[in-house]
Amino acid sequence: MDILEAIKTRKSIRDFKPDPVPQELLEKILDIAIRAPSGVNKQPWEFAILSGSVLEKVKEKNVEMFHSGQKGQSFGSGIDRESAYRRRQVDLAKQLFGLMDIAREDKEKRIKWTERGFYYFNAPAAIFLLTDESLPLERVLLDIGAAMQTICLGALAHDLGTCIEGQGVMYQNVLREYGDIPANKQIITAIAIGYPNWSFPANDIETPRESLENITFWRGFD
Ligand SMILES: Cc1cc2nc3c(=O)[nH]c(=O)nc-3n(C[C@H](O)[C@H](O)[C@H](O)COP(=O)(O)O)c2cc1C
């Protein structure tokens, strides 16, 4: 797939077929993704890749924690309610709930939707992006973001879909205990990965982008 085509067609996938993703394929994707650039070439990324019974246990425990009212690590946006950022967040929720036919007041369906996130949208595998505890997050997040996007683009070359998921690392203790993620690694985010279920309504989503003229400051071009 052409690189521009890949960038254009990548989108978040929120339901997957049960078909497993072979370890060798995930290795290929990660091997390419670590070609991502990083400041001073420090390559601060590490990965935990969960699948099979290990991931199933994590899913189950996530949902258990959710229903027991455990707070977990916040993955909320902390965005000003009056801002354009908040408007885009609300628009996304409306778009997803519209596709899924979830009414604003339908508490039960909304809970089910949140559960789906804790199940990594039924993905057969999930990649957790880690960094060493010795590294300050503000010094590594740009680097890890580059690797994150490269994973998502690389996945497309193998007909795989992805959803980056802050929600997926909300219960860090679950990941450490059942995913055996070392205590000296910070857990940044999850990427659900698998073969997209294209008949799932939320996978029809096409998220808009702000027009370039509203977000650019061109100087010296006249
Ligand atoms: C850091 C980060 C965290 C995200 N966390 C979640 C999440 O917890 N749940 C979810 O459904 N999507 C999550 N997403 C996906 C975004 O909602 C999605 O990228 C955005 O709406 C743009 O849509 P697109 O990926 O389809 O282009 C996350 C994306 C990023 C980059």
Image (cartoon, helix red, strand yellow):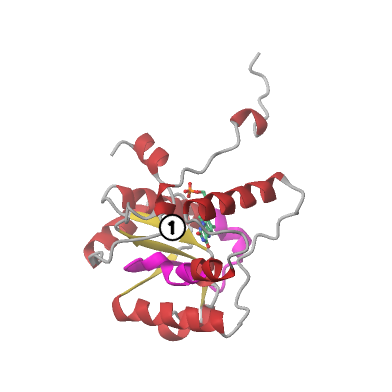
Residue stretch in magenta: 114-142
Q: Is residue 25 left or right of residue 167?
A: left
Label 1 residue SS: strand
Q: Is residue 179 visible?
A: no
Q: Is residue 101 left or right of residue 10?
A: right
Residue at position x 64%, y 52% from top?
90
User: Mark 1 sits on what residue?
Assistant: 163
For the view shown, which residue lies furthest in the top direction?
A: 222
The quarter holding residue 213 reads top right
Whether the magenta-drawn stretch holds residue 89 is answered as: no
Residue at position x 60%, y 36% from top?
210
The quarter holding residue 208 reads top right
Whether the magenta-drawn stretch holds residue 116 is answered as: yes
Residue kind at label 1, given as amino acid type: Cys
Residue 162 percent location from the top left of the image: 39, 56
Residue 27 percent location from the top left of the image: 28, 62
Residue 100 vertical placement versus 3 (above, below):
below
Q: Is residue 93 left or right of residue 193?
A: right
Residue 10 vertical placement versus 131 (above, below):
above
Residue at position x 53%, y 59% from top?
102
Q: Is residue 71 left or right of residue 47?
A: right
Q: Which is more toward the observer, 80 or 29?
A: 80
Callout 1 environment at 10 Å: few (<14), some (14 to 19), or many (20+)? many
Residue at position x 48%, y 51% from top?
99
Where does the C terminus fall, quadrant-wise? top right
The quarter holding residue 16 reads bottom left
Q: Which is more toward the observer, 93 or 221?
A: 93
Residue 206 percent location from the top left of the image: 47, 43
